[in-house]
Image (tube, helix red, strand yellow):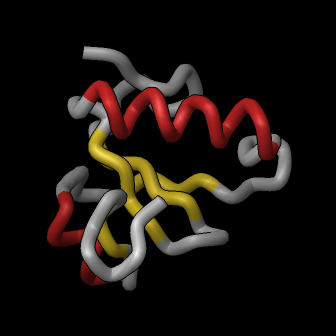
Amino acid sequence: MGRLHRFPDHRFVGRRDLMIVYDCDDQTQLRDLEASVRDLDLERKDLLQSFAPDDQPEAANRGFRPAGSAEGGP
């Protein structure tokens, strides 16, 4: 499975500007995240976040919702 180069060991990576978490094991979500990172320069703007433990419940605990969710994912 692919990963972002800055987060090679993290499955779940969040966008702080939208409070959305992406599952990097989902190729569609990874592709969308990579495009956003590239097009919006999210790394330089420090708008990406990983989680420990690296799981969706921890992301939700920090206020992130899943990408593509009915609540308004990308």
Q: Residue furthest top?
A: 1
Question: Splitting the image into 4 quarters, where does residue 34 fall?
Answer: top right
Q: Which of the pair 58/17 is nearer the observer?
A: 17
Please, is residue 36 above or below residue 67 in the view?
above
| Residue at screen point 36% across, 39% down | 29
Q: Quadrant of the N terminus?
A: top left
Count up the numbered dots.
0
| Residue at screen point 38% across, 84% down | 63
Q: Position of residue 66 (x, y in %)?
A: 29, 64
Side of 72 where 12 appears, left or right: left
| Residue at screen point 73% across, 42% down | 43
| Residue at screen point 73% across, 31% down | 38
Q: Which of the pair 70/4 is nearer the observer?
A: 70
Q: Which of the pair 24/71 is nearer the observer?
A: 71
Q: Position of residue 16 (x, y in %)?
A: 60, 68
Q: Position of residue 42 (x, y in %)?
A: 73, 47
Please, is residue 6 above or below residue 15 in the view?
above
Please, is residue 58 above or below residue 26 in the view?
below
Side of 68 where 54 appears, left or right: left
Please, is residue 1 above or below residue 42 in the view?
above
Q: Position of residue 31 (x, y in %)?
A: 45, 28
